[in-house]
Amino acid sequence: MVKRLKELLSPIIGVDAAASVIASYDVIGDIAIIKVPEQAFEYRQAVGSAIMNDNKSIKSVWAQVSPVQGEYRIRELANIAGEDRSVTVHRESGCTFNLDVREVYFSPRLSHERERIASLVGEGERVFNMFAGVGAFSIVIAKRVNNVKVYSAEINEAAYRYMLMNIEQNKLKSTVIPILDDARNVAARLRHGVDRVLMPLPERAMEYYEDAIASLDGGGWIHLYLHVKRSRGEDIIYLTKDRLKPYGGSVESYRIVREVGPSTLQLVFDIKFNSI
Ligand SMILES: C[S@@+](CC[C@H](N)C(=O)[O-])C[C@H]1O[C@@H](n2cnc3c(N)ncnc32)[C@H](O)[C@@H]1O
């Protein structure tokens, strides 16, 4: 696939641009999503067909025509090959996720991060996923760890409906608790009631950081996802840690989750709060 797409695109948009198109290609269930640059948009059907020819499990190809945007973090998509269908079933880490790629946020690129977080959760923990989407982090955790409760807040009604379906299909009805509400309201209700908080909304997580801290039962862990701009000569880790200092807690580890733009990284900070 990579070779054929490269051959197709390189003469049109250049070798570097072709490589970045290929790197932008995601598979969610039997749907492929690809960022086709403006200069190559007229060749989008050929790009879609090349993907389908080389990967027979792909039944539908969509071009991403807007960035991930808005409160629900969704992107505009245009069907460029195969079935005009945006609902699919994605399998990952022994879990099943039903979703509509046009209505909800979902990234297969976070699968490693979901596994990593699940490996940190201890038996019997109460976890609060503030921005749960279709329940991906919550379900991977609940499948892996015994006796957990994962409170899962989401404001996008479509994502919430898929989360209900996914909880049911993964047989996690008593462990993942879906909540259709703003994370801030849910944090107020869970006040001092959880051991761990996930904040997978990098663009706005800082706005909810104090709510997350207040929901911890004395002590616990917060996994804070942030988009951080890289700029030459600056130590972005030092600067971010400095920004977090006034809130207390200690950054025990951090990692680059992925690159989200030419100079922007998605980072996760694992922050420990000791009980008082
Ligand atoms: C970047 S997505 C992450 C979804 C999910 N955790 C995943 O990895 O697939 C962020 C999600 O938070 C939801 N969201 C945004 N603001 C919210 C809020 N104030 N309260 C609850 N959910 C919110 C969005 O609708 C979106 O589904």
Image: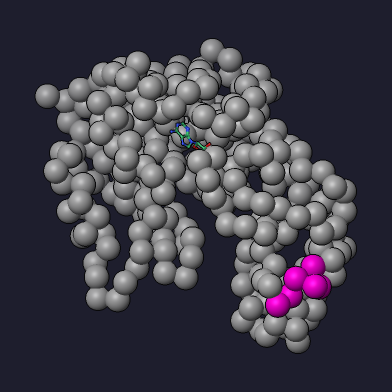
Residue 202 visible in this rendered orientation of the protein: yes
Please tell me whether residue 126 is drawn above or below residue 135 in the rendered image. above
Classify residue 45 by image quadrant. Answer: bottom right
Please state, as top left, top right, bottom left or bottom right, where the N terminus lies in the image. bottom right
Q: Position of residue 183 (x, y in %)?
A: 41, 28
Please tell me whether residue 11 is drawn above or below residue 108 in the rendered image. below
Q: Position of residue 116 (x, y in %)?
A: 45, 43
Furthest residue toward front: 70
Furthest residue toward left: 276
Please state, as top left, top right, bottom left or bottom right, where the C terminus lies in the image. top left
The stretch in magenta equals: 39-44
Please tell me whether residue 59 is drawn above or below residue 160 in the rendered image. below
Relative to 170, 128 lies left or right = left
Query: At x 50% / y 20%, what residue is drawn?
Result: 179
Classify residue 267 by image quadrant. Answer: bottom left
Classify residue 122 by image quadrant. Answer: top left
Q: Looking at this view, is 94 or 204 the one in front?
A: 204
Please tell me whether residue 165 is drawn above or below residue 223 in the rendered image. above
Relative to 53, 236 lies left or right = left
43 is within the stretch colored magenta: yes
Query: At x 56% / y 52%, what residue is drawn?
Result: 68
Residue 59 visible in this rendered orientation of the protein: no
